Amino acid sequence: MRPVIEQSAAELARAVGAKEISARDVIEATLAQIDAVDGSVGAYITSLHEMARASALAVDRRIAAGEKMRLAGVPVAVKDNMCLAGTRTTCGSKILGDWIAPYTATAVQRIIEAGGIPVGKSNLDEFAMGSSCENSARGITRNPLALDRVPGGSSGGSAAAVASRQAVVGLGSDTGGSIREPAAFCGVTGFKPTYGRVSRYGLIAFASSLDQIGPLARTVEDAALIYEVMAGHDGMDSTSIDRDVEPAVTAMRSDLRGLRIGIVKEFDTGKLGHEIDALYKRAFADLRKLGADLVDVSLPTAEFGLATYYLIAPAECSSNLARFDGVRYGLRVDGADVGEMYERTRAAGFGPEVKRRILIGTYALSSGYYDAYYVKAQKVRTLIARDFQRAFEECDLIACPAASSPAFGFNAKSDPYSMYLMDYYTIPMSLAGLPALSVPCGSVTGEGAHEPLPMGLQLCGPLFSECALLGAAHAYEQASQHAKEYKLAI
């Protein structure tokens, strides 16, 4: 039998439910791994050892009473922009200080009710703004497969925790690629559902029309399981979609026969370099070998995704982060009057990237520029969504890169533009609200790397196509087994 920390969520939940192992034993093994390796990785901002132990005992009592739970005893890393009652919730920022959440996010609550056990609040780029997990005021997170490399962002802590066996699954949020990119960098699966499919209640907002909670896991089946538990309508979230959740776990398939998979003409992998181009061409060929019919599709407005996103997301960020002013909670720096107090608090509390996006967003929303920038960006967003609709008339799913490179070294992308470019392949799907995921597809030799580094294949589908998307990813994962190639550096 494999060690507890190497088992999947599905395996552990079955074993705990069958009383073959206790939830307490699962948690103790996981906490021992956290104690052993997180000093090197830095996946967690806050560890929850005692809370996790108490939760494990409660799960064991529920099992003894005959209760059935889909996630019985499964250790979960919770991104630190999600509220968990009684725990410090920082968003990786100084401005929240040591704020203790008074309630629990709906998605997290559903995990707990299903028997999942949070073992820590994981690190992230401040307020989920970044692609490397270097922007956190709470320290950096290292990639467990190459400690001199970033884990990706903004959900880098959750991805690193899952990859380093410090959690079986992780919860992340994806605004423009913040689940999919760290999944690609850390050699795990990361899934962003359709916008509104998983409640955002209790997720501290970055960009409200884009943010979506999703799972990071070492298998597609586990991602499907976590998604199925979290998804569904929530009256506490006005953007939550009132639609039945199709059973995702039973949608796993062994081949891709009958599927048309689109290859985007505008996403030319040749410009990414010979090695990366060859990797993605092999991945596309593997999809064909599994029975898929590959067809060319066009997304002519996708090239404008980056510019569109970096107007809409900062504008919403400017509005959402106005509430952090030193009056109600978190950091407060006194001044001569209330205006000076606001200025000093926000200057000391927000990091450089957050300030940059607030300034961009405030400018785009200001009088005289609102129509020229924000309104125009929203119109382009509509065009991007329409392009996807037309593309899906010709195919069932789309395959493309999840990232343009493997994990890079710390401080390698010091100018904002080069960092923003990391989201080039993931942003269009976010703007259109589509479900998308990254699944391991091999490795390449990154610049200056000692060992090959993971890459991710991105698959996306029409709105509410989660089952088809996860089923196809499972078939590719099982046939290719790329995740087994990756070796931890800890």
Image (cartoon, grey):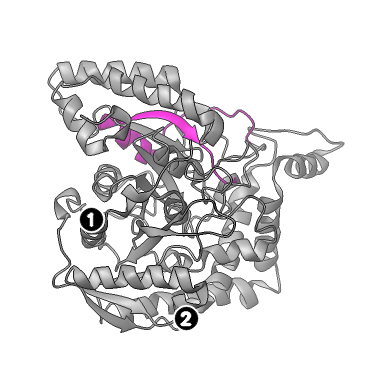
Front residue of 348 and 376: 348
Mark number displayed over residue 486: none
Q: Residue at x 32, y 54 (%)?
A: 482
Q: Residue at x 65, y 42 (%)?
A: 324
Q: Does the magenta-highlighted stretch encompass residue 114?
A: yes
- In the image, is residue 45 above or below residue 175? above
State which tag comes first along the sequence, 2 or 1. 2
What whole-number distance in Å separates the C-alpha atoms at marks 2 and 1? 30 Å
Q: Quadrant of residue 266?
A: bottom left
Front residue of 180 and 407: 407
Residue identifier under label 2: 301
Residue 389 visible in the current orientation = no
**Residue range highlighted in magenta:** 96-125
Residue identifier under label 1: 474
Q: How many numbered tags mark residues here?
A: 2
Within 10 angstroms of label 1, few (less than 14), some, or many (20 or more) residues? many
Where is residue 485? Give x, y as percent. Answer: 35, 50
Front residue of 431 and 451: 451
Residue at the far right: name it. Answer: 336
Q: Residue at x 44, y 48 (%)?
A: 186
Kind of residue at disc 2: Thr
Query: Is 404 left or right of 198, judged from the image as shown?
Result: right
Kind of residue at disc 1: His
- Where disc 1 sits, the SS reads helix
Query: Is 141 left or right of 163, judged from the image as shown?
Result: right
